[in-house]
Image (cartoon, coloured by chain):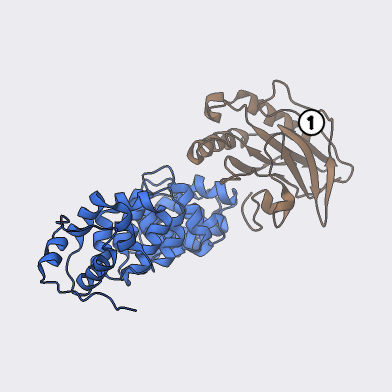
Chain colours: A brown, B blue
Amino acid sequence: MTTGPHRALILGSPGRYPFNGHLRLAVHSGGARLHLAAVVAPGCEPPVAHAATVALQAQLADAEGSGRFDLLRSAWELLAGIDPSLLGPARGGDLALLMVAWDDDGLGVAGTGLDALHALGAQVEPLLEGAHPLFGIRGVPANPPGLFTPHEPPAVVVGSPATGALDPLAHPSWPLACGYRAGGAA
Amino acid sequence: MSGPPVVDLSGAWERDVLAGDLQAVDPPKQIPRLRALVLEANRADRSLMALFRAMERVDPIALTDLALGPRAPAGSRLVEAALAVVDTLELQLSPGSLYRRLVVLSGGETSAILALAARRHPAASFLVALSDAAGEPEPGLAHLLAASAHPAFVQACWDHAAAGHHAGLVAAARTTGRPEAAAALLANGAVPAAQRAVALLLEEHPDAVVAPYLVGVWGPDLDAFWQGVIHRLRSRAAVQRLSRICGDNPRLHALLEAVARGLTVSG
């Protein structure tokens, strides 16, 4: 059982605009909750990337479901239905997405375009590394990738984009390496 | 050891040379006499332009020595004439060294030097240090304005932000309407200055696209940043612009509404 809240974060990228194309979103539906972090069109000029995040956020905000699995399934369906031209010049091919969904019975982690997960608490610990069905190349997947269910649900899950993640150890903290400022929204 | 040659600015040779007639001059052999003439003319507030323009055709190396060498006199007339032959001087000396030397020789009036250097080399990194050396009131502003239409503008913003030129970047954002100036401040941790810059962009550049650049450097959690912007706004129009771009945090919108109520309609 988990009561949450839980949070998804994605590491930024090296460069002048490390969080270009980043978004975070919280969705409540029935007895389930979803928190997601995504990055799309990060190599574009900021206004182009921002327009892609706005489109993605608007689409995924409609996710609904009575439990965590339903909520995740709904998010995948919404993602599959988005007009790719709204996601920047790569048409969503550069998307990295991390979703954590939870209900009274537990927490599930899903995503695309990731190659490592870390749990953030008092310490940073690897949550999932190496080969796992959840991991894969960036982009909108043709089929929903695998789901990961941690035994001990962490408060914060950090995803590393499959390509171009910055080194969190070079930053003052992991949250800052994700562009997360305590007290901010979503 | 002999002292410097005595100079009579009304003498025939001196008058001819200052007028740019170098027929009676062999520059390499007469450098001391030319230097003394430059020194005296500069002191007497006489123009050196004709002489320098003639010298650049005849002997650019001697010109460089006269204008910039270790015994070149400081003063506005010398700098004015040097700027007129800067094409030639730049062939003799690296631009960074050239303009730094001119700042030293200027005796304080550096705006023309800075403006020319920025116009000719908008992408040059030496302009960051030159802005400080020149004592620019808002360091970086001349460079940033000159580079505002150049691809190097964004790099210049980051360089000046790293050098602590916050006032220059705020002024540049206000003048150019470019949000990258505010983003550079934020990226370098200068949060209050970035908030000032954003407030000015919202007030004076209604079409400026601000939020994407801030998210790019800071991350999507901008609520605390926006709060610091709100209290710097002076018009309802700017409050409304911020309301459209700051997301849907109810507390933030309540604050915006309270601020808007406190502003006059005409504001």
Does residue B20 appear in the picture of this structure? Answer: yes
Q: Secondary structure at mark 1?
A: loop
Give the residue displayed 21% in from the left and 54% down from the top.
B53
Which corner quadrant of the image does residue A158 belong to? top right
Q: Is residue B217 above or below residue A140?
A: below
Residue indicated by mark 1: A134
Query: Which image quadrant: the N terminus of chain B?
Result: bottom left
In the image, residue A169 lies at what x, y percent?
74, 52
Q: Is residue A34 left or right of residue B126?
A: right
> Measured from the top left, where is residue B146 in percent x and y?
35, 51
| Location of residue B96 in the rendering, given as x and y in whole percent from the top left corner | 42, 56
Please name the residue shown 16% across and 63% down the image: B18
Marks counted in the figure total 1
Rendered view: B56 above or below B265 = above
Q: Residue at x 80, y 37 (%)?
A: A108
Classify residue B115 by image quadrant: bottom left
Which amino acid does the dot numbered 1 rest on? Leu
The image shows residue A103, relative to residue B71, as above or below, that is above
Rendered location of residue A80, percent (x, y): 64, 24
The answer to whether one can see residue B265 in this image is no
Position of A89 with respect to B29 (left or right) is right
Q: Residues within 10 Å of mark 1 (few under 14, many from 20)?
A: many
Q: Quadrant of residue A106?
A: top right
